[in-house]
Amino acid sequence: MLKSDAGVFSSHGLDKGTAVLLEWVQQHSPVMDDTHQNLCDLGCGSGPIALVMAVLYPQCTVYALDINERARLLCTENARRNNLTNIIVAHPDEVDTTTSFALLWSNPPIRIGKRELHELLTTWLTRLLPDGLAHLVVSKNLGADSLTTWLNSQGYPTIKKASSKGFRILEVTTQS
């Protein structure tokens, strides 16, 4: 059960992009060799991605990150309501800079602007482990293909893994 509210992305329920990402990752989520790793939901909102990560990888620690205080409160409440104890909800600035991640899943905030989005993604993609993966869902109409090109130009090998309902699932690996 997931509660959302005003003042949070997709306040009226699960948005289409997140639904596409969650459907895809549940069918294609990677097997974790070391089950005690850190995972990241960047821009967690009320927490649907973090909750799925916590269920799929119960021995891992999921960092649910958002700058919106209301989103963090809702994510914390949703984790508690679903008896998920492996989620740490935090403001991005509260995460130790030495913390790295095996997986990062996100419906990134495309509308914050290109410069801000690029800064956000490069900041957190550098935190992936050497064999880490990021899966991003981005609307085709909001620049999924140009974001793929930009990520590749920045040294983050990025490929389109799927396309559904106007959204692309992008897989990003660490810098080569």
Image (cartoon, rainbow, N blue to C red):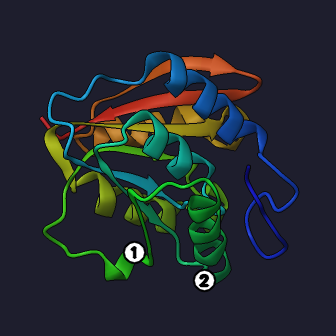
SS category of the residue bearing label 1: helix
Other residues around mark 1 within 10 Å, as few (<14) / some (14–19) / many (≥20): some
| Circle 1: residue type | Pro
Give the structural element (helix, strand or loop) at label 2: helix
Q: Residue at x 57, y 37 (%)?
A: 137
- Residue 151 percent across, percent down from the top left: 36, 41
What is the distance, in whole Å, between disc 1 and disc 2 at their CAs?
11 Å
Q: Which residue is identified by label 2?
A: 69
Left or right position of 15 against 59: right
Tell me the amino acid under the disc marked 2: Glu
Residue identifier under label 1: 92
- Judge by depth and name the residue closer to the eye, 103 or 140: 103
Tell me residue 117's x, y (percent): 49, 61
Q: Residue furthest right?
A: 12
The answer to whether residue 128 is above or below residue 57 is below
Q: Please report contact status of discs 1 and 2: CB closer than 8 Å, yes or no.
A: no
Q: Residue at x 47, y 30 (%)?
A: 170
Residue 25 is situated, as x and y percent measured from the top left of the image, at 50, 26
